[in-house]
């Protein structure tokens, strides 16, 4: 697995998965100056995109029709070539039980909607640093 430099000429790739295009647009506006943003509107589409062009990080909504974010994350984590991609859940769900479900599904972090740009950017940077370190390890 290659190491993704945090300060390279190539932008770090982030996949934003949400069934509501307006939510994707909001996050895109927050992040597109610093990162290359890819979008998916379903869990199945996200898995296909990850298999064809793995991102460095995934921002994943929990509540989606058909294949929800929790099931999508579990499926990603079952695939060795995708399992190390950090997933930050971005959701309107706020209970401790909901948060626990996100951790148990394999999420690396949890951000509540409406998303605060500064918080999201800091959480992304933290997960990317951890991923960079993890990619160096065997």
Image: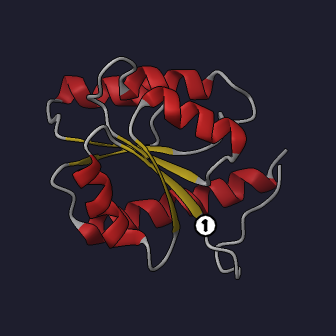
User: Where residue 29 sits in the image (x, y, percent)?
Assistant: 32, 71
Q: Is residue 55 left or right of residue 137?
A: left
Q: Is residue 9 left or right of residue 32?
A: right
Image quarter of residue 12: bottom right
Image label count: 1
Image quarter of residue 116: bottom left
Q: In which quadrant of the rendered image does the C terminus lie?
A: top right
Q: Residue at (23%, 26%) from the top-left corner?
A: 98
User: Where residue 51 sits in the image (x, y, percent)?
Assistant: 69, 36
User: Where residue 85 sits in the image (x, y, percent)?
Assistant: 61, 44
Q: Is residue 124 above or below residue 23?
A: below
Q: Is residue 24 above or below residue 125?
A: above
Nearest the viewer among 91 and 48 is 48
Q: Residues within 10 Å of mark 1 (few under 14, many from 20)?
A: some
Q: Is residue 25 above or below residue 77?
A: below
Q: Which residue is mark 1?
A: 12
Q: Residue at (49%, 77%) from the top-left corner?
A: 34
Q: Residue at (44%, 80%) from the top-left corner?
A: 33
Q: Is residue 66 left or right of residue 1?
A: left
Q: Is residue 85 left or right of residue 121?
A: right
Image quarter of residue 3: bottom right
Label 1 element class: loop
Q: Residue at (82%, 56%) from the top-left corner?
A: 2
Nearest the viewer among 76 and 42 is 42
User: Where residue 63 sits in the image (x, y, percent)?
Assistant: 26, 28
């Amino acid at each position: 697995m290659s190491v993704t430099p945090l300060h390279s000429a190539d932008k770090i790739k982030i996949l934003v998965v949400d069934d509501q295009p307006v939510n994707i647009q909001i996050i895109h506006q927050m992040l597109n100056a610093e990162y290359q943003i890819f979008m998916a509107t379903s869990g199945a589409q996200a898995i296909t995109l990850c298999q064809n062009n793995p991102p460095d990080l995934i921002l994943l909504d929990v509540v989606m029709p058909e294949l929800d974010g929790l099931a999508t994350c579990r499926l990603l984590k079952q695939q060795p070539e995708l399992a190390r991609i950090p997933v930050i859940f971005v959701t309107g769900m706020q209970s401790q039980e909901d948060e626990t479900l996100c951790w148990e599904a394999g999420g690396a972090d949890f951000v509540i909607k409406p998303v605060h740009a500064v918080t999201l950017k800091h959480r992304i940077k933290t997960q990317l640093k951890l991923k960079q370190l993890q990619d160096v390890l065997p």
